[in-house]
Amino acid sequence: MSKEITSRAADYSQWYNDLVIKGELADYSAVRGCMVIKPYGFALWENMRDALDKMFKDTGHVNAYFPLFVPKSLFEAEEKNAEGFAKECAIVTHYRLIADPSQKGKLMVDPEAKLEEELVIRPTSEAIIWSTYKNWIQSYRDLPILINQWANVVRWEMRTRLFLRTAEFLWQEGHTAHATRAEAIKETEKMLDVYADFAENWMALPVIKGIKTANERFAGAEDTYCIEALMQDGKALQAGTSHFLGQNFAKAFDVKFSDKENKLEYVWATSWGVSTRLVGALVMAHSDDQGLILPPRIAPFQVVIVPIYKGDDQKALVGKKAMEIIGQLKALGIRVKYDDNDNARPGWKFAEYEMKGVPVRLALGARDLEKNEIEVARRDTKEKRVLSMEGIAVYVNGLLTEIQSAMYDKAKNYRDEHITAADNWDDFVKLLDDKGGFISAHWDGSPETEEAIKDKTKATIRCIPLRNKEEEGKCILTGKPSSQRVLFARAY
């Protein structure tokens, strides 16, 4: 398979697909709209998952698992949620296949095996979880419930794209129950902070924290908080959401508790989630025309050592020294791979690990042993240095920290340069077409105006930034009064 990559300038969409496929993150599957996550891509997701999982547990949450199937009657209980997801639902109606008498070797649905009640394959788990919480909650002593689950969900998408939008994807979804409105809102904001911390300090991805408009909020929520990131093509990507659900699901499923005065009250709820879409964000935010560039903190391996030798004797000598260095690196907690595969030449390996975005590459040959030197190459800047092998592990450890920081700074500088104010419609449209990025503009606050702007430009209000400053102005479309700017962008 050719390893050539379409350039970002020539075709950004194809560039992205090339990196996902040729960087061995994922592949297309036999199931329309679904993907196969390959081992390298899954290792990346595992590192992301493990970091987030620790952050969840450090904030008092525990993991559980709920069924993939949701009885249709339960799914319908919260009307806004059901309506919001109805068009994306996959439904199980029968439970058995039988031989088709009209076509030898073919199977057909057994008409006698129709389910008594149809089952929705979960697009999200609020319904099945809140029907369960009803049995778990009687008193204020049972609260709060702080549960997360790692799972897959199905949303039947017509237009799919690897990692960014697939019919089935992996995610985590937190579902918490609280005694008071204030406690639930605090939880919603806390988890938004967790997501922002992870995005910025692990993914090197700067994000803007904000609140969604009524048109864009999660179906069944009172408020949706979000983190928004900017990709290198100037389009925004929603990188995580945290929802204050109010008492909507508690009322739909009649989940009440006795408070300290022995009065019955409805429970207050939150839900929050991120998905394998973050892998797509990682690709688009950092990579270049030579391949992936992965942040050291979540790269499947942070260092690769490529030996250069002729013959078995040199291979043994280089290998012995490489094992010493590997031991030193691992002692510092660094994930390292030693590639002594004889089926590929060093030059091919260099290109391969550049494609895969390994943060640091060490090249070690027989001549280097004589000089006690080693070549160090960093993926983000392609800078190469020949250094003494003395203290090399400590140097590499510091270099990984430097790369992580540099990647964040580069992405943040790009993001900040692409937040632009527009004060009238013509400037707004021109900025969208010529520059892209986030456009800070006034909006009159009406859903109708928001929808009209979307219809005319394909730009949506990505968020109302948290702690947004008040500023009198006029809506870019209607000219009506506005008290603050919001962030618009075209988005994935």
Image: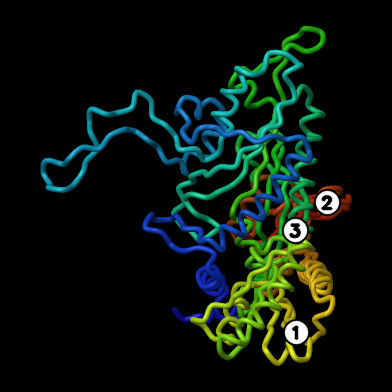
Looking at the rendered structure, the kind of residue marked 3 is Trp
Q: Nearer the viewer, mark 3 or mark 1?
A: 1
Asked whether residue 408 is in view, the answer is yes
Point out the tag, 2 or 1, that comes first from the N-terminus. 1
Q: Is residue 290 above or below residue 229?
A: below
**Horizontally, is 96 left or right of 4 in the view?**
left
How far separated are the C-alphas under marks 3 and 2? 32 Å
Q: CB under 8 Å between callouts 2 and 1?
A: no
The x and y percentages for residue 382 are 72, 83
Which labelled disc corresponds to residue 202? 3
How far separated are the C-alphas under marks 2 and 1? 56 Å
Q: Which residue is mark 1?
A: 374
The x and y percentages for residue 105 are 16, 48
Query: Which residue is at 51% across, 73% downward?
Result: 22
Q: How is the image coloured?
A: rainbow
Asked whether residue 412 is in view, the answer is no
Looking at the rendered structure, the kind of residue marked 2 is Gln
Point out the tag, 3 or 1, that comes first from the N-terminus. 3
Query: Which residue is at 63% across, 67% downward?
Result: 283
Q: Residue furthest front?
A: 313
Query: Which residue is at 78% across, 27% downward?
Result: 181
